[in-house]
Image (cartoon, rainbow, N blue to C red):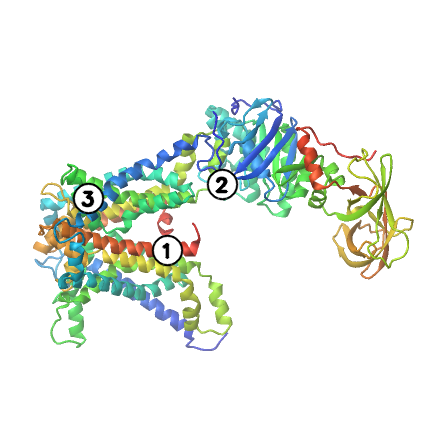
Amino acid sequence: MQTNQTTSVNRPVAKQLTLDRITKRFKGTVALHGISLTVQPGELISLLGPSGCGKTTTLRLIAGFDFPDEGSVRIDGADISHLPPNKRGLGMVFQNYSLFPHLTVAENIGFGLKMAGASRSHIQAEVKRMLAMIRLESFGDRLINQMSGGQQQRVALARAIVTNPSVLLLDEPLGALDKNLREGMQFEIRRLQQSLGITSVMVTHDQEEAMTMSDRIVVMNGGRIVQIGKPEDVYNYPRTRFVAEFLGTANIVKGRLESIDGKRLIFSLPKQNASLSGSACRISILCDETPTWIKPGNIAEIAVRPEKIRLGGSGDNTLQGVVQQHVFRGSQHSYRIDVPELGTTLTVSQFADFHHDDVHNANETVTLVLDEHAGVLLEPEDLALNEQAAGDGAELQQRKVA
Amino acid sequence: MQATATLRPARPALAGTGAPRSRRWLLIVPALAFLILFFAIPLLQNAGRSLGENDAGVFANYIKLLTDEYYLKVVVETLVVSFNSTLLSLIVGYPVAYFMVRRAGRLALPMLFLLVTPLLTSIIMRTFGWRVLFARRGIVNDFLMWADLIDRPLNLLNGPMSVYVGQVHVLVPFMVLSIIPVLRAVDLRLEESARVLGAGALKTFFLITLPLSKDGIVTGVILVFMLCAGSFVTQLLLGNGSIVTLPLLIFQQFSLTQDIGFASAMGNLLLLLVLACLFIQLRLTEGKRGNK
Amino acid sequence: MSAHRFHPARWGWALLGLYTVLFFIFVFAPIAVVVAVSFTAEQGVQFPFKGTSMQWYARVWEYKPFVDSLLTSLYLALSSAVAAIIFAVPAALWLGRSQNGIATGVASFLLAPIAIPALIIGMSLLYFLSSIGIGVSFTALFIAHTVVSISYVMRTTLSVYRNVSPSLGEAAAVLGAGATRTFIHVTLPLIAPGIFAGSLFAILVSLDNLALSYFFGTANVTTLPVVMLSYMQNQFDPAIAAISTIQMVISIVLLLIVEKTYGLRALTTQ
């Protein structure tokens, strides 16, 4: 079965990881509901979601610290579901690094090779190569407690990849670092992973981190996969309200479907305040496919990202609002705007372009424009889940604007 | 290697082996078996032996222990001596613990070492030392005479005082060691807040520090009480018979007595006393720390 | 800054400091006296005394029961500590990662011998062993001392082991180490300080354990505390001081050995 390799290959053949209908129960509660996932060779995917969504459980099942009640874990087709962790040939970076405090940096890195029975000279050579790769050449004889957080992070990474694992697992690897260090390490880990082409699965609750580092993001909630896709796709085309609100900020408005014109749906945003005159604002949304679950007259939720609302200008589909709060965030201006027509407050953000002096202050009245690209139709939660369950492990298709 | 699909918590007990859980319990078997065989069973056997089979009834030995004037006195004496010694140890030891935690700074570790060193010496050695100090022509008497407090040397070794001194001497380190970690956990800033709010040093101590270090005091008190209740060397060598506690009685009677059942009853009574202390401690700590 | 000369707080601390000094004098007085008396040139126990001599150490060397029982005690302490390690370390490994009520109960049971007066343990064990055919002998002594030593070793080992993060074992597993190799390469080095500290405790307690050994003494096989006690009751001379001092020095040496190898921090975490 899988074992750590003792010989080094500069760019080993990347492997595919498949989770096939994995179900896991703990003392009566279901932690994972038949989740399925395929990680392509050389890909880095992130399992992203709130606490308790099952992402850590999934990672631990892949690692072998626990075993699925139903379903299987396969690497390049070989079933490893019930192998103990020391026989799976994986690499793992733990949340608090889990470096051995009684061993030096070099001994930590070489541990996996030692377990695999490599010769001392080989271990020495590989450790040296790794230390160079993580730019800690002279730190081999140091003890772990003499290293800074960022350095320990790199040692943990080196320890995990020196054995040429078929899959690299990362359990919230950057959680313990402070912000500046974290951003640097995000790029560093990603660079290393890509140059070595190791298939990787990362668990994180930080959506920015997931978006920065991943080829694809797997959004999980309540033991289920809610959406899978490239970071831009998941961000720009969230399937459900949960995804829209979990990744970045989203304004959620309710719209009534007025008409369907091929792939274009026209919604009206009903006035919440009866005393306001004029017709309701309309918004048109382009879909990849005509949705079957909604008919004219139904009400649905629409997500609008703050950066997609334009301020100023005129037109038929505009809303009037009063600025409640203005926050300057360095690279952008963020506004909370009260829109009586919708009976809600919208968040709008604009890039701070220093040529542009159009800052809006509190109590100012502004016009908000919603273009065709501004809104995304959100599916109801249960619909998305049923589709996922029926999907049988197939990729969830994303809607793209044509 | 197939593993059974059992319900497991998120962190399996022996992480990382994939070994069927059913084999891990083997680790505990040797120790458990050894102690059951050579610790639990003898104690149970002892308890059994203490229950008489003769015409006098099952609890005859215990009735005798608790009603006969002499034996009752011994039992009560055990409790009284333990209680007094514990109280004295607390009064003597708490200030030391306080000083070591709050004030000693770099000296704290050497002081800790000094505190622990007496525990390296034999109890006979320490008792011997007190015998020398309290002797008729020993230093204590010499000092008292020099200070004109007494005319003739006191026979200090005939009374309870030397026993108490000896006991406290042995017990205080344990008391201090119990209090230190808890005192350390009392945030200095709490005392400082009290001071800012107007409380003087003594008030701060009695209203803030003392209550917060309660746990350590309780642990120390129970520990010291148990140790004292079970000890007899000090009473044997320092009291000259003035203080007779249950363990001392057992020790002295053991080679003399024909009545094994009665000896066992004495031992069992002492055991029950100690178990009661342990039980109280378990109750108190369980309530405090939930389920650690 | 206040201009007060007699700042009450500082006087309070000074008083407390003085008290602490007196306390430590109190603690060391009897010990110091015994060490001093061991060097007396006089024939009786007297403090203060005139003249120093090594005569009492010579006497100890000549008095066969002292020497024999000292060797017996040392051998007993070391062998029961080794046996205790063999029993207690696996027990600590099991208890350290078990979180249920049964484990808590088992832990309490295995730690109980420390709390139960040695007098009772000794007495009941004597009766029990003779009822199964093991009479008064070194074997009986060995069993008795091992019972107590197991608790001491387990207490510190368990405490240290509980502080070892389970994820270290997981990391070792992912890197290819099975259960045995994880134990040898990761767990054992990390719990070694706990094992040593507990063994030290066990040895020191065993050397001084009068109550436990009292019941098992024979003319040939007996431990030092028992011999010291009877000597003190029958003869009461400075030889006691000499042998006590020797015993103390041995204990200090053992303590220093453990301190140098592993540090004493494990002891203070109780």
Given residues A151 and A208, the one toward you in this image is: A208
Q: Chain of mark 3?
A: C
Q: Quadrant of residue C39?
A: bottom left
Q: Are marks 2 and 3 on the same chain?
A: no
Give the vertical position of A229 relative to C10 (above or below): above
| Camera-nearest label, 2 or 3 | 3
With A20 as the anchor, is A239 left or right in this view?
Answer: right
- Going by the numbered disc 3, the residue's amino acid type is Leu
Q: Residues within 10 Å of mark 3 (few under 14, many from 20)?
A: many
Tell me the tag on residue C125.
3
Given residues B193 and C132, the one toward you in this image is: C132
Q: Which residue is mark 2?
A: A144
Q: Which residue is mark 1?
A: B283
Taking the image as drawn, is residue B211 in sight?
yes
Secondary structure under the numbered disc 3 in the rendered image = helix
Given residues A176 and A238, the one toward you in this image is: A238
